Image (tube, rainbow, N blue to C red):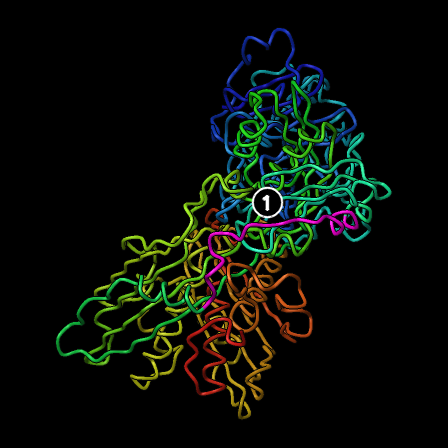
Amino acid sequence: MVYSLAASTLTLAAPVGCDTSSAEGVEPTAAEAHGPSRVLVTGADEEMLVLEVTAANKVVLRLPRVEVGQGITTAVAMMIAEELDARLVDVDIPLAEARTKGNQYTGGSSSVRSLYGPARALAATARARLVTAAARRWHLPARSLRTRDTMVVAPDGRTATFGSLTAAAARIHRPDVSSRPKPASKHKVIGRPTGRIDARDIVTGSAKYAGDLEVAGAKPTVVARPPTLGGRLVSVDDRAARAMPGVQAVVKVAGGVAVVAESFHHAFKARDALRITWRPGPLASLSDAAIRSRLRAAVPSVGAPPRGSAQVEGEFEFAFVSHAPMEVLTAVADVRADRAEIWFSSQTPMDARESIASAIGLPKSKVRVHVVRGGGSFGRRLNHDAAIEAALISKAARRPVKLMWSRGDDIRHGRMRGASHHRIRASHAWGRVVAFSHAMASVSESYEGQGLAAQGGVAVRGGVTTVAAGPLPSDSGLYNFGRVSGSSGSVELAMPLGAWRSVDSGTMRTAEEIVVDEVAAELGKDPVAFRRGTLRNKAVKAVLDKVAAAGNWGRPLPSGQAQGVAVHEEYGSCVACLVEIDATDPKNPRVTKVVMAADVGTAVNPRGLEAQLMGTAVDGISTVLRAGLHIDRGAVREGSFADFRYARQQHSPLRFEAHIMPSRREPGGAGELGVPAAAGAVANAYARATRTRPRRFPINF
């Protein structure tokens, strides 16, 4: 439901139960404190959007999602500008604080999908009220008025800004014109390539991240952490550190020893002066080879193939991968005896608020979480371990702190994509695939009360356990492959894992697309033609045809160079990717060209979607060719971008094309969509260029 919340300006909220005073900062009038005055339109009752038109002619929508570089603030601003006929520059999209109810989850490529209807409905209702207010002021029929450039326009040319009408519009209960959103055929903003509304702030440095915040008294803070995952503090001699200039406090925390100082320079110097004895973590005897062996043993059987069929089989290994967002984890915390305030970038602020409250022993009603933009995430900010740690340090030190995890902290002790092992068998007879089986096992986490990871929602039992097989969360039904089956197992390790961009699909579809290429070769068919003949979905065929045509599939290339292709369907969307690679030196391959085509339904901002697809291409290049984490005797070997070798500019394609398929259906998901197709295409291109069958990723590990 959409309600009017204030009389001084036009302020609309959806739906019943919106915690406006504490969660959104909107103070209802006395008359409305007992309940909203009138239902205007049905909306999504979990989004709880709040839209205000201010007297200064600004349209403000408090967004219950976090901006981590994916462009959601721009996409939502476009939705609002479209329905209000407002200038995009007049639309502000601040991030909402953590609430007590509703949906504030940013993930699963769901933000545009979930907000598209509610945001447009709210803006359309605001527009109807503003038009009605102008009509009554001018004594004109409301249907004779038009809106443009954040103002209402009369037939005789008179204009009134939305801001000048907002107080009158707030008192209107029943608009004189329709409050339905526009049909797609009338869109002028949605669907038009648009630059990010925050681009100038980002490139000029005025965009504020957690590390930029000036919270009264908050002092720079770092933590000394154990050399192994899950290691424990035995003893610490902090006398030298405490005596150093600028040091204000040294406190023990679950994850190690924290140093609070006047600057990060002082804090890091003092941290390095601590003399600490550590007890090794529960995986101190475990390294990569043993983990791979356990994963291989945990993969369920793929069963017996159909009689009379021939087999194409493959086993695939995928390494652990760090999220490694460019902005390292940072959180500001001010914990008092009776209340707490935390500032950080969170994809799950409601869960974070509850976890922080539990960790510091306060009711969640006494904990205020300010959501700050993040410099990248890729799933890392679904977890809030840094914020919990900052709150605990603030409580122990009895002062506000600004905690920063170093790059090494996050790579060696932060979340990562779990390693996995896949066994796939495609059975073919009479020139077609008659059965397709995919069994896999992945590392799953199992932390319990051990250090920080426990407070991020995981648990340590110590040691390693193989978990019984279960159904495989796969979408192998993309192809008409007869009997499709899947199963999964897992190996529990006491290490911090987290959802990494595209989650399971990034490895599962990659492995499957490699096998699809190998089946095509076995049957003597071209990889694109074979896919076209077996894909179930016309939309997937269309994106495949698009990249094949745009990328000139099959063109002659020199020895050591080749093309590869792959497709993926998820989130109500589909994508295809064509890659060209130069693997003349197999140890230093270079992707030279990427062509992607995506059908995501309505693309609110095609330019933003192109950027998302470009990012997924780099993810595919990185995780297939270069970037992974090694485990050496219970410790993560890598600690910076010097050894966690994510693709840099010199490894990026010389040419990139993104083709957005036209559609008027509602948006599907896009943020994670391209990773599996990009990774599969890179792997297939490498295989064709080197005439090998890669099985372990990243290839150069």
In depth, the one of 481 and 638 nearer the eye is: 638
In the rendered structure, which amino acid carries the disc numbered 1?
A: Leu
Q: Which residues are magenta?
A: 268-288
Residue on which the image places disc 1: 233
Residue at horizontal 51%, vertical 65%? 597
Name the image quarter holding residue 398. Answer: top right
Q: Is residue 501 above or below residue 4?
A: below
Q: Determine the secondary structure under disc 1.
A: strand
Q: Is residue 584 magenta?
A: no
Q: Is residue 380 above or below residue 286?
A: above
Q: Residues within 10 Å of mark 1 (few under 14, many from 20)?
A: many
Q: Is residue 113 above or below residue 518?
A: above
Residue 698, percent from left and from top: 51, 71
Q: Is residue 271 magenta?
A: yes
In depth, the one of 70 and 506 nearer the eye is: 506
Residue at horizontal 24%, vertical 78%? 311
Residue 433, percent from left and from top: 25, 74
Residue at horizontal 40%, vertical 67%? 292
Residue 188 visible at all: no
In depth, the one of 613 and 682 nearer the eye is: 682
Residue 224, percent from left and from top: 67, 48
Residue 615, percent from left and from top: 60, 61
